[in-house]
Image: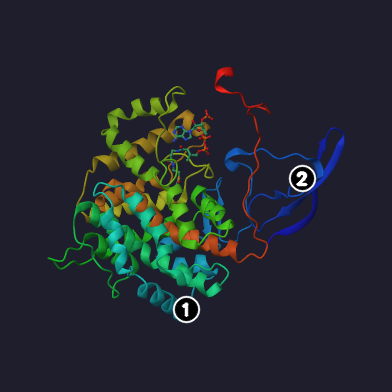
Amino acid sequence: MLEKTSKTAKITIDGTTVEVPVNKGSLGPDVLDIRSLYKQTGLFTFDPGFTSTASCESDITFIDGDKGELLYRGYPIEQLADKSNFLEVSYLLLYGELPTKSQYEDFSGKVTRHTMLHEQMLNFFRGFRRDAHPMAIVCGVQAAMSAFYHDSTDINDPWQREVATIRMIAKLPTIVSWAYKYSIGQPFAYPKNNLQYAQNFLQMCFSVPAEEYVVDPILSSAMDKIFILHADHEQNASTSTVRLAASSGANPFACIAAGIACLWGPAHGGANEAALNMLKEIGSPDRISEFISKAKDKNDPFRLMGFGHRVYKNFDPRSRVMKQSADEVLELMGITNNPTLQVAKELEKIALEDEYFIEKKLYPNVDFYSGIILEAMGFPTSMFTPIFALARTVGWLSQWQEMISDPNIKIGRPRQLFTGKTHRDYLPYEKR
Ligand code: ACO
């Protein structure tokens, strides 16, 4: 809960001083409440990319970028990755507390019973080209859900919001796995209710009707960990997109589709795909210095993918869990001396000792190792971002629920600093 302090900040413009309140959260920097600034001064603040702007009040996820700490509802990500599971974490994110045993059973039972898609939706998958990027399919089918589940699109009804939330958490694994199945020309595998969430997802991706498929517990546990690590990350680009879309009153299926579209970009969710492609392009440790030089060259747009973060100016805590998980999965798969993992570890070591990366506080982020694990599991690179979208859906929904249940919700409407042409009169062709 936001705490009003007695502190104020004074801003003096042309000899006139206005005072703005300084508010406190439970963790993190205080904020200047500038909501009345325009009214009082006629001035806007200018903050492209929101580098110094808190866009909302939230009690879901906290990141301390300098310490390299990530908390979901107060619980450190490392503890959740080690001891919890994705559905328990989903409950925590959505409702604020870890569930009791019966709450957990009720929640996971509901999610399990909503995993099937309306059979008519199969036609959507079949309408895409086989070589379509799975993110294009996932984004399209996600948006199309609003055309199928009319009984859960009224955002003013808490029961409908709850049903929509359960539906999306339950159906995203089906949508994502079917996007994959379609791309490789295999039959769609239906969900199985006797399997856990991550096991079921792997089953839908890798089983074929001709054979019995047994999910390896180490793989499903690594998959579950990937889901937990990606479940929420406070007000990142895609989450802010979901909130902005939702602020207009759009239905939840459309809002999550907007989040998926934003996540696709290589500076955000697409970075795991780009990171693995980069590691492969480097190919062997002796080419690392060439790529480090490119990343440091101001005239070269190349960046080390999987490095750097808007908020973390220290290790991304998720990358540590990922690195350990990469070792475990590769060992299980009997992949020793994996050249990509070798390049990744060596690159990390060299970059962390390099003056440029030290000075700019550029550390490996979650995407640096996740691609190596997913590839070892058998996923093509194009599936990395859809898997991220699947996991982040619960974060987006938690943030959406938090926002929509706030009675003071306002449409998001940033202002601008206009630098274009001033008023001028239309001229006919002959005078231009
Ligand atoms: N390689 C080389 N230089 C970098 C990198 C990088 N990966 N990241 C940042 N820098 C440099 C920039 O060139 C800039 O240098 P300058 O100050 O001399 O101009 C400085 O560090 C700050 O960079 P910004 O782009 O201003 O930092 P910002 O906070 O806006 O960007 C971002 C963060 C987009 C993640 C950036 O670090 C990046 O592009 N990383 C690579 C892509 C990536 O891994 N994205 C995944 C993010 S995590 C996620 O979405 C799950």
Q: In front: 140, or 239?
A: 140
The mark lying in front, picked from 2 and 1, is 2
Where does the image place residue 195, in percent across and percent down from the top left?
Answer: 29, 72
Residue 432's place in the image compared with 241, above or below, is above
Asked if disc 2 and disc 1 are in contact, CB closer than 8 Å, the reply is: no
> Does residue 431 appear to the left or right of 210 in the view shown?
right
Q: Quadrant of the N terminus?
A: bottom right
Residue drawn 44% across the image and 26% down it: 296
Marking on residue 383: none
Task: Determine whether the residue tagged by mark 1 lies in a helix, strand or loop.
Answer: helix
Where does the image place residue 143, in percent across and percent down from the top left?
Answer: 42, 57
> Does residue 281 appear to the left or right of 53 in the view shown?
left
> Does residue 90 appear to the left or right of 384 in the view shown?
right
Residue 19's place in the image compared with 290, above or below, is below
Q: Is residue 385 visible?
A: yes
Name the N-terminal-most of marks 2 and 1: 2
Marking on residue 103: 1
Task: Determine whether the residue tagged by mark 2 lies in a helix, strand or loop.
Answer: helix
Residue drawn 84% across the image and 32% down it: 14
User: Among all residues in the image, which is located at the extreme bottom?
Assistant: 102
Query: Alpha carbon of mark 2 to alpha carbon of mark 1: how far?
Result: 45 Å
Marking on residue 37: 2
